[in-house]
Amino acid sequence: MKKIMEDPSKIMRRSIHTFLQNYHRATTAAAVVLPFSAALLLSQPFFSSSSSSLHARLNTLFRGAGFSSSLDFFNILSLKLSQTLSSSLFTLPFSLTFFLFSKAYVIRLLSNKHDSEDSSVYYLRLLRTYICNSFFLISANASAFALFFLAFNVLESFGFYSRNFYTLFSLSSAIIYSIILANAFVISNLALVSSTSSSSGGYTTILKACLLIRGRTSTALALALPTNLGLAGVEALFRYRVVKSYYQGDRDIVSIALEGTFIAYLYALFLVLDTIVNFLFYQSCVKNDEDQKLCREDEYSIKIQICETENTKICIKGPKGFQEIL
């Protein structure tokens, strides 16, 4: 049976309505996640210039794997990976505390059973799932690199050495890597919001998210696009208004710090909205699966049979076998 998903625009509108309806609590959640958003925004420009050592090591790793220096994609990828890894390690204490506390607060608020379980239970399940998500994302990246390594060496063994080949391979690798990474992030986000409804969280929620996402990938990506564009816009605003002003020295440090705090709080609000969007998407997936299950039960448990006896009779197959109704 084909999965009929709710329109992404309806889920997004419902998410924004939920966010505005609970704005006073959403601002509380944003205040909780503010240290994480501030650390993340500060780490990105800082590690853009100070991750050269890790960048050099990743370049060496790619060269050792057999990738040519003419592949611009892997040169750019090694730079972005070094910055991402450095930033992730720097913000890890904030991710495991403030970020997950905020998610637990928002999910407990949106859940129908938020009065029955303590927030600490939600946090522990989110923590287990977050750690498993980290290994899952590392595995997704490793699988993508293994695929590129295999494809590059096979094609090179057939005599593809031209500059046009390197350009085409870089473009195709960038597209495939983006698809793999986008799906991995969607599954990770869905696993996080679904972990609170499981018994303990962890790798089982990732498997559950993989099953839920089947046939709904386009919807999940369409929902992830607006919030990620908003987060990217806030990051660009922080670089332009705070980082640029700090290095140019055209404003005093107090005004830069105040504006940076405001931008970090705006980033935190987008993180809260992203949690709401993912949670409502998860609820929509579960409701859709439950509706399909009921439809299948109705389809196969109730069958009409015409009993050919002296008089034509109609029977219904129920729990006690065929029962005559006419």
Image (cartoon, helix red, strand yellow):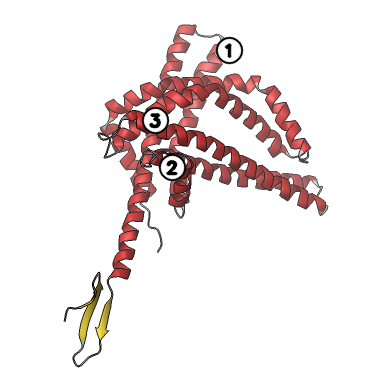
Q: Can you see residue 267? A: no
> Three-letter amino acid code at disc 1?
Tyr
Q: Which mark is residue 96?
A: none
Report the front residue among 204 and 177.
204
Label 3, secondary structure: give it.
Answer: helix
Mark 3 is on which residue type?
Answer: Tyr
Seen as rendered, the residue at the extreme front is: 320
**Residue 264 sits in quarter:** top left
Residue at the disc numbered 2: 190
Identity of the residue furthest to the bottom in this view = 310
Residue at image mark 1: 247
Task: Classify residue 13 by image quadrant.
Answer: top left
Q: In the rendered structure, which amino acid carries the disc numbered 2?
A: Leu
What x and y, as percent, mark residue 136?
55, 40
Residue 65 visible:
yes
Vertical arrangement, residue 321 with respect to residue 157, above or below: below
Left or right of residue 83, residue 267 in this image: left
- Name the N-terminal-most of marks 2 and 3: 3
Residue 147: where, in percent of width, then height? 67, 48
Report if the CB atoms under discs 2 and 3 are less than 8 Å apart: no
Distance (Cα) linking label 2 and label 3: 16 Å
Q: Secondary structure at mark 1?
A: helix
Q: Which residue is mark 3?
A: 123
Residues marked 1 and 2 touching at CB (< 8 Å): no
User: Which circle's residue, 1 or 3, is located before the other in the chain?
Assistant: 3
Looking at the picture, tell me which residue is in the foreground, 307 or 180.
307
The label nearer to you, 1 versus 2, is 2
For the C terminus, the image quarter is: bottom left
| Nearest to N terminus: mark 1 or mark 2 | 2
Residue at the image point whose x is 58% and y is 21% from the top: 45
Q: Residues within 10 Å of mark 1 (few under 14, many from 20)?
A: few
